[in-house]
Image (cartoon, grey):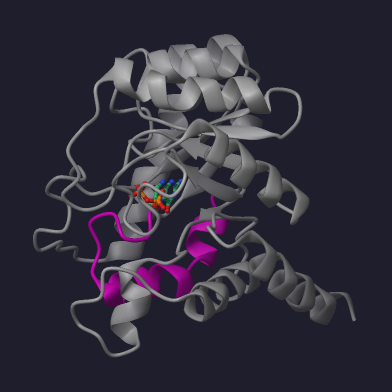
Amino acid sequence: MGIVNVTPDSFSDGGDTLRPEDAVTAARAQARDGAAIVDVGGESTRPGAEPVAVDEELRRVVPVLEALAGAVPVSIDTAKAEVARRALELGAELVNDVTALRGDPAMAETVAAAGAAVCLMHMRGEPRTMQHEPRYEDVVGEVVAFLEERLAAAVAAGIAEDSVLLDPGIGFGKTVAQNFELVRRLDAIVALGRPVVVGFSRKSSLGRILGDPEARTGPLSASVAAAVAAYERGATVLRVHDVRETVEALTVARAVYAA
Ligand code: HH2
């Protein structure tokens, strides 16, 4: 899954693809480079991010979705039902909701009515405050219990179980150690029986484990390593900014298994 952020403030690429034509070019390039789907987002969820109004989010993403319709498989990264509905009308196949259907009471019904797929992600708190001393007794157990409950809620709302993907939410209310523990013990999430999405790309835990305690991002090399580690533990969707390098690394990792 490639990432195209149509935002001025995303944590690693804010502003790079804010102009619709730049976002469309980036999405097409990611598809050419091997992305199975491109995740288009108009609101940053970085720690401390301020929410974006629905009109502004639509203004950012709709021209991009219109241009990509029918050409590139698209996922819409939004917590707003109105944005999801418009994106689904324009051909998006998947709603990537970092609130796992908790952010907007109309979201579950919107996804169900369209027969779309949905990614349910674990997040502690909300982006504005989520990194304020995250504490868990057992981070893996709590993430698994949360995802299990959200999967049941999605199915109860009429979303087909087969259409649900689950994501531990790397960096969303977790310490560096907790992020790595979630990848190390990914099998506990895989055991829920749904495809697992992991988004470790460029996240600050990668820069921090490399020795900079103040890092806001992590480098490409570390992002690729994290994607391969997650793949080897059962992740089926890797959400990444650098598609070509990740696809190459995953091709090699897969060849090891095939051999
Ligand atoms: N991470 C980000 C945003 N959306 N969605 C899922 N399912 N999983 C993730 O790990 C995830 C996500 C943060 O990355 P990015 O989109 O590059 O940054 P920003 O939220 O600042 O736009």
- The x and y percentages for residue 152 are 45, 31
Q: Is residue 107 visible?
A: no
Residue extending farthest bottom: 211
Vertical side of 204 occupied by 171: above or below = above
Instruction: Give left or right: position of 102 versus 241.
Output: left
Toward the right, the furthest residue is 259
Which residue is depicted at the point 53% across and 19% down? 87
User: What segment is highlighted magenta in the picture?
Assistant: 169-192
The residue depicted at 39 percent of the width and 13 percent of the height is: 82
Residue in view at x 47 percent, y 20 percent: 84
Residue 60 occupies quadrant: top left
Q: Position of residue 85 (x, y in %)?
A: 49, 13
- Where is the C terminus found, in terms of image quarters? bottom right
Q: Position of residue 157 (x, y in %)?
A: 46, 16
Would residue 185 be counted in the magenta stretch?
yes
Q: How many marks?
A: 0
Whether residue 27 is in magenta: the answer is no
* Residue 158 position (above or below residue 98): above
Estimate the x, y position of residue 137 in percent, counting from the top left: 19, 66
- Whether residue 254 is visible here, answered yes or no, is yes
Residue 168 or residue 140, whichever sits in front: 168
Camera-nearest residue between 223 and 65: 65
Q: Nearer the viewer, residue 29 or 225?
A: 29
Question: Is 11 located above or below residue 153 in the figure?
Answer: below
* Residue closer to the observer: 201 or 69: 69
